[in-house]
Amino acid sequence: MFGYNGKVLRINLKEMSVKTEDLNMDMAKKYIGGRGLGTKIMMDEVDPKVDALSPENKLLIVTGPMTGNPVATGGRYMVVTKSPLSDTIASSNSGGRWGAELKFAGYDVIIFEEKAEEPVYLSIEDDKVEILPANDLWGTTVSVTTKKLEEKHAKNCKVLAIGPAGENLSLIAAVMNDEDRAAGRSGVGAVMGSKNLKAIVVKGSNKPKVFDDEKVKETNKAQLAKIKENGVTGQGLPTYGTAVLVNILNELGSLPTNNFQKGQFSGAEEISGETLAEKYLIKNTACYRCPIACGRYVKMEAGEGGGPEYETLWAFGSDCGISDLKAIIEANYWCNEMGLDTISTGATIAAAIELKEKGYIKEDELDGLKLEFGNATDIMEWTKRMGYRQGLGNKMAEGSYRLAESYGVPEFSMSVKKLEIPAYDPRGTQGQGLQYATANRGGCHVRGYLISPEVLGLPEAIDRFATEGKEVWAKIFQDLTASIDSLGVCLFTSFALGAPDYADMINMVAGTDHTGDSILEAGDRIWNLERMFNLKAGVDPSQDTLPKRLLEEPVPEGPAKGWKHKLDEMLPKYYEVRGWTPEGIPTEEKLKALGL
Amino acid sequence: MEVEVRYFATFRKNGVKKEVIPFEKSISVKELLTKVDIQEEDVAILLVNGIKVDSETILKDKDVVSLFPPVGGG
Ligand code: SF4
C-alpha cells in the first residue's frame, strides 16, 4: 500500500462507536481520493434525497493519496457531505496542517454517521480514537476551542472545529482547521453542527509509505522548480497573495460592486492586495509543504492573525461598497471565529443592503444597526449576528437566497443553486459564467477557474467576452480540477503544473499508472458522479443558470459596459461536450464509458 | 496628447501608482513601455481602457494603460 493508509474510521455518533475498516482500494484508485472518493462513498451509502441536516446525512472527511506525502502542497483534505444550502453534493477543501496529520495518524477517511445526543468531539492519537464530551466547548469560538484542545491533548496536535455558526446550523457555516483555514463553502459546518460534533483533534506519528522514494524526490524537485519559475506561483502569489486580483478585476470592470449592480469600485485601491501588503502584512504563511505561501498574516485589532483573501476583500469590500480595509480585516477575523464562509457571509450582507435600500427590509428589523452600501460601521456586528443567529442575523444565517426569498424577491440573491457566486462578474468573463452555472456545488469559482485563461492569460490568453469554444475550456478545467481536488494538493499548483505532472505525482507516490489523459478522465468520472448525485437529490438542470440580473441587465459602466451573460449560447454546447442529453442528463453510454 | 499609466503589484517603483505622461505625437504601447523602463516580456496583463491589447496598439489621447506583472489567485 503506497500513498494511502488503506484505513477508514467509521464513527457512529448515536451508538458512540468507533470502527476501523479497510479502505476499498479498487474504489480508491478509481476515484483517486478526496472529492472523488468522498462522492462515491456518499453515493453508495446515503440517499441523495436525505434532509442534509438530519442524522441520516453523513459527514465525510477525506484525504487524498498526496495528503501527508512529500509533494508540493500535499496537505489538503475534503469535507464531503450533502449541502444544506444548495441540496447538492458538497465538497469543501482546506489546507493548513490538519489533513496531513490525519494521514500520519493512519487514516484516509473518517465517516461520521447519525447524531450525538450531547455535544462531543473526536480525539485521534494514532490507534487511540475516542469520542469525548464537548459541553464545555460548545458555544465557544474557533480560536478558543482550538486553544483549549491544544492544551488538553498531545503536544503539536492539530484541531479542526466548527464555531457558533455551525452549532447554530447557519447554512453558510464553514469547517475550520488550524484556527484560520476553512473548508468554507456549501454550509458543511452546519452538517457538523447538526451531528453535535464540535471538533476533531488529531495527532499522528507515522508517515505513509511511498512507492518510489527516489523518484518521488526527483519528481518533486522538478515540480518545485516549475512552481518557482512560474510568474504566478513563484512571484505573484507569494508577494501579494490572492488579494492582488482586486485591482485587476477592477481595471477590467468586472469587480462586482454593490451586489453586482456595477463592475467597478471607486475604493478598489484602498482594499487591494497592494494596500494590504503595504499597510497590514506582517508575513506570508504557508500550508503543509507549500512553496507558494499565499497566506497573509496581518496586523489587526486583536493583535495579529490570518488576513483576508481576494474573495473576502471583495465580499465585504466592493460587493458591500466598502473601502475600509481595517473593517474588512476585522470582519474576516470574525468569520473565522464564528466559522462562517467569508464569501457567502459578505455576499449575503451585500444582498441584505440592497433589500434594505429597495425597501424590502424595514428599518425596525435592524436594531439600530447600519445596513448601507459603503458603510463599514456594523459589518463586524452583522457577521457576529449571523453566527449567533440574532435579530435579522437569524434570517441572514440562511444565506442570501433564502433571505431574499423570504421577502418574495429571490432575484436579489446573486447565487447559483443557492450558493453565492464569487468575485468575478460573469458578464465580463463569459466562460467563468458558464462555469458558475454548471458547477456541481453551485456558484463556485474554483470548480473550473476560467479566470486563468480569460483574465490571467494562463495557460494561454482567450477573449473574455467570447462565447465560442468556452464549453470545451469549461469541461477541461472542471475535469482537471476534480482530479486535483481528489489528489489532496492545492489547486494553485495548476498555474504551474499540468495534467501530466499530476500523473507523475500520483504514479511515484501511489504506484499507479496514470497518464495526463487518465487524470482528466478520472475528473470527468467524478464530475458525472456528482451530477448524478445532484439529479437524484432533485437538483434538476433548470438550476444550471445565473441570477436574472446577470442575464438581463447590462453592465452599466466601465470596460465591460453593455455586456450581459450569454448563457443560452453556451449551455447547449456544454451539455453536448459533456456527452449529456440536450436536457442536461448524462447518457447511458457516457456513464458506461466512464465505468459508472 | 497624454496617457495615464497605472502600475500594479511589483511595477510600483518608489511608490508610484500612476502617472500622466505627455507625448508630442501618438506612440505605440511598445514605445511607452520603453519610456517607462518596463520590459515587454515582464508584462503579463496589458490593458488599454480595461481591454486587453497587444504592444503594437497605438495609443490615443487620454487612454488609460494598466500594467500588471504575472499575478494570480482564486
Ligand atoms: S498556495 Fe496558498 S492555499 Fe495553496 S497550499 Fe499554498 S499557502 Fe495553502
Image: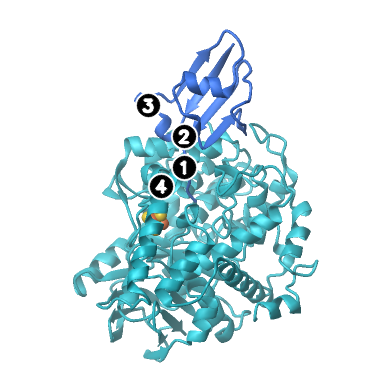
Chain colours: A cyan, B blue
Q: Secondary structure at mark 1?
A: loop
Q: Secondary structure at mark 2?
A: helix
Q: Tell which quarter ligand 1 is in.
A: bottom left
User: Badge 2: how crowded within 10 Å, few (<14), some, or many (20+)?
Assistant: few
Q: Residue at x 25, y 71 (%)?
A: A157
Q: Amino acid at mark 4?
A: Glu
Q: Which residue is mark 2?
A: B42
Q: On the same chain: label 2 and label 3?
A: yes
Mark 3 or mark 1: name the one nearer the start of the chain.
Answer: 3
* Percent of width and height locating residue A441: 59, 65
For disc 3, the chain is: B
Q: Which residue is mark 3?
A: B13
Within 8 Å of ligand 1, the CB of disc 4? no
Which quadrant holds residue A578?
Answer: bottom right
Q: Which residue is mark 4?
A: A229
* Percent of width and height locating residue A231: 44, 44
Question: What's the CA distance linking mark 4 and mark 1?
Answer: 13 Å
User: Badge 4: how crowded within 10 Å, few (<14), some, or many (20+)?
Assistant: few
Res. B71 mark: 1
**Compared with residue A464, is residue A575 higher up or lower down, i.e. above or below?**
below
Within 8 Å of ligand 1, the CB of disc 2? no
